[in-house]
Image (tube, rainbow, N blue to C red):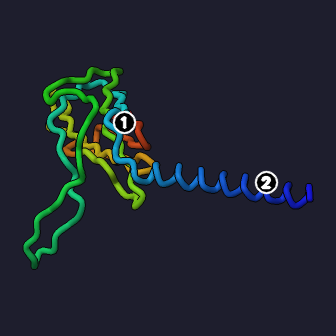
């Protein structure tokens, strides 16, 4: 009789644990973006030039066919904090872009931004695209108008460099 009671207790414990895990997962999956959740993308100016923030704009989600009419949708873009357009970052300094974070059980990009800096005193520009996915953060960069400069984009770490 004690053995049967022990098996019944173990089964109830396992069922309760499974129920708790299921309820926790359902609560996580149904939760929307938290109002204070963001991912900090940091830009480090490793060059000898000042950078001026020219624009911060949404990133298009796809390309339209040249033979059809379409509207280009954009990923959501919202920040907990970021520098103002027109602000400058001196050599050696950092800027932080706190792009909002969201979770979706379907995955994919939740928030994205296209950030463009001008290199003060030149025609060169550097463009960073930053993305917040449900489970990771990604970024990319490109320098326009000069081969004197380079950039890197790794996860939430962004840099701007002189070519030496």
Question: Residue 12: x, y in percent?
Answer: 72, 55
Element under disc 1: loop
Instruction: Choose top left, top right, bottom left or bottom right for residue 64.
Output: bottom left
Q: Residue at x 18, y 29 (%)?
A: 52
Viewer can see residue 109: yes
Q: Nearer the viewer, residue 159 or 82?
A: 82
Establish if 46 lies above or below 127: above
Establish if 121 lies above or below 130: above
| Quarter occupied by the N terminus | bottom right
Q: Residue at x 46, y 49 (%)?
A: 28
Establish if 6 lies above or below 85: below
Q: Nearer the viewer, residue 121 or 76?
A: 76
Question: Residue 24: x, y in percent?
Answer: 53, 49
Q: Residues within 10 Å of mark 2 (few under 14, many from 20)?
A: few
Establish if 69 lies above or below 93: below
| Quarter occupied by the C terminus | top left
Q: Residue at x 68, y 57 (%)?
A: 15
Q: Check disc 2 and report the residue beneath it.
A: 9
**Labels 2, 1: front one:** 2
Relative to residue 119, is residue 24 drawn left or right? right
Question: Residue 153: x, y in percent?
Answer: 39, 43
Q: Nearer the viewer, residue 148 or 116?
A: 116
Q: Check disc 1 and report the residue beneath it.
A: 37
Q: Earlier in the sequence, mark 2 or mark 1?
A: 2
């Amino acid at each position: 009789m004690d053995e049967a009671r022990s098996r019944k207790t173990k089964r109830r414990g396992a069922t309760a644990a499974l129920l708790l895990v299921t309820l926790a997962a359902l609560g996580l999956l149904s939760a929307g973006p938290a109002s204070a959740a963001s991912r900090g993308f940091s830009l480090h100016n490793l060059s000898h030039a000042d950078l001026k923030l020219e624009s911060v704009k949404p990133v298009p989600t796809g390309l339209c066919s040249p033979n059809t009419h379409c509207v280009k949708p954009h990923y959501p873009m919202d920040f907990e904090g970021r520098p103002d357009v027109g602000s400058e970052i001196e050599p050696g300094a950092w800027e932080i872009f706190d792009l909002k974070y969201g979770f979706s059980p379907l995955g994919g990009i939740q928030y994205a931004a296209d950030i463009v800096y001008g290199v003060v005193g030149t025609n060169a520009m550097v463009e960073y695209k930053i993305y917040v996915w449900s489970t990771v953060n990604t970024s990319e960069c490109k320098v326009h108008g000069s081969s004197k400069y380079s950039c890197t984009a790794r996860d939430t770490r962004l840099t701007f460099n002189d070519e030496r």
